[in-house]
Amino acid sequence: KNQVEQSPQSLIILEGKNCTLQCNYTVSPFSNLRWYKQDTGRGPVSLTIMTFSENTKSNGRYTATLDADTKQSSLHITASQLSDSASYICVVRQDSNYQLIWGAGTKLIIKP
Amino acid sequence: GAGVSQTPSNKVTEKGKYVELRCDPISGHTALYWYRQSLGQGPEFLIYFQGTGAADDSGLPNDRFFAVRPEGSVSTLKIQRTERGDSAVYLCASSLISGSTDTQYFGPGTRLTVL
């Protein structure tokens, strides 16, 4: 079954600290993996898109990694800010259709 | 417009009623997607349009759900005989083209509550 699992389910850290969110997937055939940020009451916003051949991709203080062999990805946030408080969702696209398989997200709370 | 817009932002209806949810994609975007998101979950795919036609409607849960995009721009998601289980946030997204690495831009969603 095509699934995307994320951990932890929620995370609280202090402003200025770093954190890493994890994503494991069993989607096949694999096309690409995306990380989205979703603020409460808003639609998701794309952070990164990584294809099979890409191991690392950065977007400002966000760095995503992908290990296509172990089917794992991580999102590392550096020097967290209060505005980073949101849900971070890992999404995998199958190569065979247009559907995106979504994880349940990690709810990140940054405390001052 | 500058982004994807959805109306209404909130909709409260009674069980058994008919509702329509509207999505205005970014101008020029040919691909349009509808998703449903329940509390604490990631979005669930419903239907994808390429232009005016539904290229993939395999995510629609049953025949009470229907969506149209008659002129290849605005789309309407229609739900007949609403049930309490239909309560969720309905998200619309659009992308410039439909390729494997297309970036989907999401609207703020319509929160549907069925009493």
Image (cartoon, coloured by chain):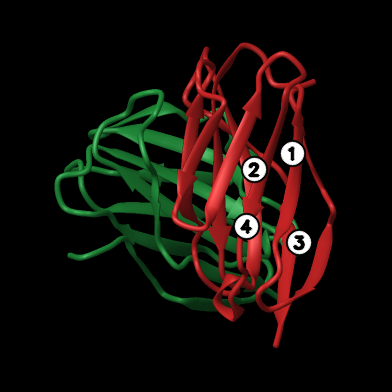
Q: Residues within 10 Å of mark 4 (few under 14, many from 20)?
A: many
Q: Gap between marks 3 and 2, in whole Å?
A: 14 Å
Q: Name the image quarter holding the N terminus of chain B.
A: bottom left
Q: Amino acid at mark 3?
A: Gly
Tell me the green chain.
Answer: B
The structure residue drawn at horizontal position 66% and vertical position 18%, both measured from the top left corner, is A68
Find residue A68 and name its label. none
As measured in the structure, the alpha-carbon distance from the residue carrying label 4 to the one carrying label 1 is 14 Å
> Quick check: B41 left or right of A98?
right
Same chain for labels 4 and 1? Say yes or no: yes
Query: Which label sits on residue B40?
Result: 3
Residue A18: x, y in percent? 70, 62
Disc 1 designates what residue?
A: A23
Chain whose colour in the figure is red = A
Residue B48, how many percent across, how many down?
42, 35
Q: Position of residue B115 (x, y in %)?
A: 72, 76
Three-letter amino acid code of the residue under disc 1 = Cys
Relative to residue A103, is residue B34 drawn left or right?
A: left
Quarter-wise, where is residue B89 in the image? Answer: bottom right
Closer to the camera, B35 or A74?
A74
The amino acid on which the numbered mark 4 sits, given as a three-letter code, is Ile
Mark 4 = which residue? A77
* Rendered view: A66 above or below A21: above
Q: Chain of mark 1?
A: A
Specify few, some or many for label 3: CA neighbours under 10 Å numbering under 14, 14-19, or 20 or more.
Answer: few
Does residue A19 show up? Answer: yes
Alpha-carbon distance for marks 1 and 3?
16 Å
